[in-house]
Amino acid sequence: MSDENLIGMGVYTPAEAGRLLRVAPAKISRWLRGHYIKNKFYPPLWTSEVSLGDDRIFLSFRDMMEIRVADAFIKRGVSSIRVRAAIAVAREVIGQDHPLSTNRFRTDGREIFLHIISEDEDGEKREQLLNLFRKQFEFNEILDPLLKTVDFSESGNPLVWWPGGRRLNVMVDPKRSFGQPIDAQSSVPTAILAAAVWQDGDVKAVARAYDVPEISVKHAVEFETMMEQRLAA
């Protein structure tokens, strides 16, 4: 994959993705590389969008959003085998190589559902949930809180992620600052703002130096502190 093809995708190592997602880097690598358990090979959940021509694992923004949902499913009791099966079925249903990163999925902790919006003969939209394992429609209302921190396109693909929640106004946008967390208003990376405060100890001075509101600097420090605490946990 050429450098030009990487523009706008965001490129993350498992360690960088794990820091943002609070998922162990080793687990991310295992899901994308495949692994052996008792001499049995379990294939990757999917293939990363990023390939630099060697054996190293890198993730795109889309891959990172896929990991985020896969991890949520598995933490809720859905096995990785079922997640892999759901991905395969969903690819056929919605025609997406990375279907978990869309806004189509719901789970009740046992099954995985695909959110389908269709129109009836009168042109009225009808929302249904397709159980990916029984392949029949369910009408349970199942909410996925992960969707609240992602902005999606009209086609349901992820555009922007708010990793600290929308209150902090910190975003991850693969088309800005190479996909690093940034202050949404100024596009200054949060790591830069926080490091400046930790070095100088003066929020007002950092805000003036980078021409950003003081609240943006405070939010950057809060976000980066939260990331550091996750690493230490």
Image (cartoon, helix red, strand yellow):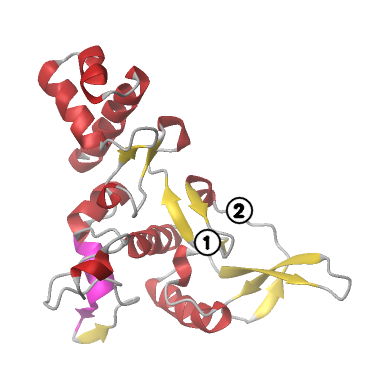
47 horizontally vs 144: left or right:
left
Locate residue 147, reporting x and y percent.
52, 52
> Residue at point 21% right, 60% down?
14
User: Is residue 82 placed above or below 108 in the rendered structure?
Assistant: below
SS at circle 1: loop
Q: Which residue is farthest right?
A: 122
> Residue at point 29% right, 30% down?
220
Instruction: Say which residue label 1 marks.
Output: 109
- Name which residue type carries label 1: Gly
Q: Is residue 49 in the magenta section?
A: no
Image quarter of the N terminus? bottom left
15 horizontally vs 83: left or right:
left
> Residue at point 24% right, 85% down?
41
User: Is residue 111 placed above or below 134 in the rendered structure?
Assistant: above
Locate residue 127, reporting x and y percent.
73, 65
Within 10 angstroms of label 2, few (less than 14), some, or many (20 or more) residues? few
Residue 22 is at least partly visible in this image? no
Q: What is the magenta range?
A: 26-38
Instruction: Say which residue label 2 marks.
Output: 143
